[in-house]
Image (cartoon, rainbow, N blue to C red):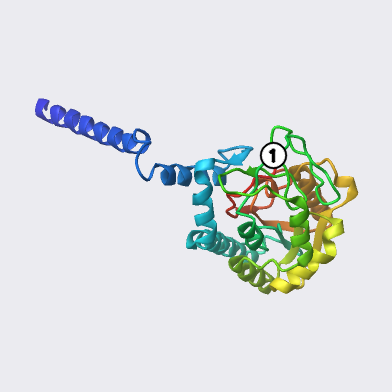
Amino acid sequence: MRLLSVLVLAAAVVANAGAESVLRSVTDFPAAADADALFCDSWMLSVETGNAGPWRQVPARCGASVRAYMEGERYASDSAVAAAESLAFASQAFASGEGGAKPAWVFDVDETLLSNAPYYAESGWGATQTSAEPHLSAQNSQYIDPSLATRSHGEAISSFLSSGLEEFNETSFDAWVDVAKAPALPSSLKLYNELQGLGFHIILLTGRSESQRNATEENLLFAGYQSWEKLILRQPSDIGKTAVQYKSERRAVMEVEGFKILGNSGDQWSDLIGLPVSTRSFKLPNPMYYIS
């Protein structure tokens, strides 16, 4: 019995030493050649899980990693996995009759259905912040805490701060929206069509302003999206509301109208949280900016 106890104690010591060794390999060697890549992978995970909270900017050391992610295969793969999980849930929920007479799926637009990657690639994948004050225009209708940087898609965003990145230009982004040539995210377009095939009512809920309705509809059609139930944009009365408040209020109206929101897809947590919530919410990746 004593020998067994000694062996158990020795095994525990070895296991603990092994665990400490693993932890040291992650935390104790910041000067390693791949330290930036390792840190930036962890930072992007923190962003996607929401652990980063209302982050202000992409760390300067991560600009190249974010660019590589957005331009590489991982972004497409991560988006495709999110779409596949969405469809698996939707198929089961629809088959069970859980959605009742009006089963609905809500989609955000920017970086969910449409990709603004061509614009961000042209402008260096981001922006630097020149003022701490929120800026509002007819297209930018959401306040954010003044300590955070501002702007994108009619909502306040974090700025992207890294060497070689250009200052975000609201005028040029709005001009890009007006061109109405943003491509579809392929996995989202596939999911959209599959949900329609199942019989879902598709509702688009975006932070873009009402003044951008024509351009948004034109772009959605250009990208291959058709036959949505409704497209909801910010109205003048929504000025000053956070994305969480604005989108929660619109989901509440949907429920009053008899829709059962089974699914909700968005690239920001503010697309998904706030009561009422959908039965399941699906977060798409976006390490470029944060919307409150």
Q: Which residue is mark 1?
A: 149
Residue located 87% across and 51% down the image: 235
Q: Residue furthest left?
A: 3
Report which quarter residue 214 is drawn in: bottom right
Say what amino acid the circle numbered 1 marks.
Ala
Residue 177 coordinates in the image, percent (x, y) = 76, 61
**Residue that sits furthest to the front in the current view:** 164
Is residue 100 shown to the viewer in this render?
no
Q: Residue at coordinates 79% horizontally, 53% vertically from top-left?
A: 255
- Quarter of the figure with the N terminus: top left
Screen quadrant of the C terminus: top right
Number of numbered discs visible in the structure rendering: 1
Residue count near mark 1 (Cα–Cα under 10 Å), binned few <14, some 14–19, many ≥20: many
Q: Say what secondary structure mark 1 lies in.
A: loop
In the picture, residue 216 is in which quadrant? bottom right
Q: Is residue 243 left or right of residue 5?
A: right
In depth, the one of 130 and 12 nearer the eye is: 130
Q: Position of residue 254 (x, y in %)?
A: 80, 55
Identify which residue is drawn at 59% across, 55% down. 284
The correct choice, above or below, for 6 with respect to 111 in the image is above
Please provide percent x and percent y for residue 251. Answer: 77, 51
